[in-house]
Image: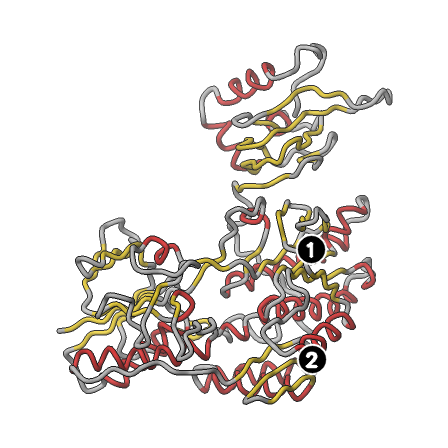
Amino acid sequence: MKRIVIVGGGFSGVYAAQALERLLRRDDQVEILLFARDNYFVFQPMLPEVISGTIGLTDVVSPLRRLLKRTHVHAREVESVDIDHQAIMVAPGFRPHAHVVKYDHLVLAPGTVTDFRGLPGLPEHALPFKDLGHALEVRSRVIRALEEADVEDDDPELRRQLLTFVVAGGGFSGVEVAAELNDFVRSVARHYRRIDPKEIRVVLVHAGDEILPEVAPKLRAFAAKILRRRGVELVLRQRLKAATGESAILGDGTVIPTKTLVSTIPSSPHPLIDALTLPKTKNGRLQVDGQLRVSGFDNVWALGDCASVPTKDGTPCPPTAQHATRQAKVAAENIVATLTKTPLRTFDFKGLGKMGSLGRRNAVAEVFGLRLSGFIAWFLWRSIYLSKLPGWGRRIKVATAWTLDLILEPELVELRLGGTGGAMHEHFEPGQLVFSQGEIGDRVYILLSGEAEVVRTPGDGTGDRILAKLGAGECFGEMALLDSAPRNASVRCVRAMTVLSIPKREFGLLAANVPGLRASFEQVTARRVLPAKPEASPPQ
C-alpha cells in the first residue's frame, strides 16, 4: 500500500487531492491523506463579501469531506516534517499523544501566513484577512465600531477613531476589502441616528504609486477613480509602520486615528516551510523543478504560494488560485506517473487573466488580452467565480444571495464569538495615554518593554505632576481594580512599549484565590512612587 500525504487545505491541496482521486479511482493500493487546520475549503475570491454580508458566512466554504470522497481528511495541523524518515508529526487532538504519519509521497501546499514581525503593534492591533474567521472578525469589528460611535458623544477623539477604518495593502485583496467595507459601512450608517455619514472615513494605504499594480495603468486609474468617488481615501507611497489600539502609524510618521485596522500584507512563508531544511529561494519559498518536485527529491512536491514554480521563461508563477489549481493537476499526474514509472509532465501555464471587484457592481478585469472595467467586468467577475465555486448547491446559494442583495438591506447582526476579551498584548507609542485619571478601572497592565510615566493632574490647576517612572517588568493599574475606585492618575507612554493587559474579571479571580497577591501588589506600587513626591499615593 502506497501513501500520498497532502499538507494544506487551500486551492493547491484540495485540487491535488481531487485530481489524485480521479486518476487513482480504480487503484485501491494507494491511500490519499490530506491534513488541514480546518475541515473546510475557503473560496478566497469571495471572502471580502462576507464583510458586507452580501453572501452568507458559510457560502464561501465547502466541507472537505464532501469535496473529497476518497481522501482521508485529517482536520489537524502538521507540526513538523521529517524528510529523512519520510514522516510527518501531527498536532495532538483531545489527548496529547504523538501522532506520526509515514508517507511515500509528500505534497507540501500549506500556503503562506500573515507575519507582522518587525512591525510594532500590528500583531496586537491589526486584523489580518486570510480566512473565514478573519472576515467574520472584521465584520463584527465594523458593526461594533458603529454601535459604540452611536452612543459615544463625550469624547470627540474616540468618536473619530471609531468612525475611521483603515485597510493596508493596495493589491487585489486590499482593494476588494476596502471596497466592500466602504459600501457596507456607508449603506448601514443611516440606521444610526447619531452618525453623520460625512464623519465616516475609509482609508486605503498602499506603498506603491498606484493601487492594483497587477493590472494595466488604465484599469488602475479606473479603480482609483471609482474608490475615490465612493469616499475611499487613497494614501499612496506610504507603508504601515506601526499600530496602537487607537491609531495606524505610517512610514513618514503620519498618525491615522482608528479603532479598526485591517492588513492584507505582509505574507510570509508558513512556519512549517520555514522550519524545513529544503532548498529555498531568497523569499523563503521552496525551490521546485518544472515537474513540481522539490529540488533534489523525487517524492516531495510543493505547490501554490509556498513554492517558487518556474515557468518556461524562468520567472516564477504568480501566487494566484488559477495557477495553484493547474499546478495541483500536474503534480497529481506526475505522482501517478512516478508510481507507474511513466514520463513526467512539465508545468506550463501562462494564466487566463486577472479580475478584481470594486464593490457595488463595478470591477476591473484582464481576460484573454481584453481589458474591461465597470459593470461588464463586474458581471464577468461574478459569472466566472460562480462557475468555479465547488458544488451546485453552493452555487445556487450564492446566486440566490446575490439576487436577494439587490432588493434587501444588509444585515446588522454583530456576532461575538468570544475569546477577544481575555489577556492580550497591546502596543503604545510615545505620548499615548494607556488610561486617564478619573476613568473606571477595567484592566491591569504588566509592562513587557519600553517605558511609561505615572502622571497626576491636581484639582488646583497647578499642572501635571510625574509621580513615577515605570520600566519593563513593572505592573500598574491594579489598585483601581482592587479598591473598585476610579483611576487616581494617568499612565503615559514615554518610550514605545508593549504591555500585557489583563481584564478586571481575570485579575479579580487571581487576587481572590492567590494568597498574598493583593498585599504583594500594594507593596510594589508603594515602592515605585518617586521619593520627590512622598505625599503622592500609588497610581491606580
What amino acid type is highlighted by mark number 1? Ala
- As drawn, which residue projects farthest toward the right? 461
Q: Quadrant of residue 29?
A: bottom left
Q: Position of residue 198 (x, y in %)?
A: 83, 62
Residue on which disc 2 sits: 218
Q: Assess disc 1: are there few (<14), some (14-19) or many (≥20) residues with their C-alpha within 10 Å of its C-alpha.
A: some
Q: Is 532 located above or below residue 230 in the figure? A: above
Say whether disc 1 or disc 2 marks the residue closer to the N-terminus: 1
Q: In whole angstroms, how far apart are the C-alphas of marks 1 and 2?
A: 35 Å
Q: Position of residue 131 (x, y in %)?
A: 49, 64
Q: Is 229 located above or below residue 38 in the figure? A: below
Residue on which disc 1 sits: 145
Q: Is residue 433 left or right of residue 481?
A: right
Q: Is residue 124 left or right of residue 81?
A: right
Q: Are marks 1 and 2 in contact (CB under 8 Å)?
A: no
At horizontal 65% and vertical 55% (from top left) the residue drawn is 260
Q: Is 349 located above or below residue 93 in the figure? A: below
Q: Assess disc 2: are there few (<14), some (14-19) or many (≥20) residues with their C-alpha within 10 Å of its C-alpha.
A: few
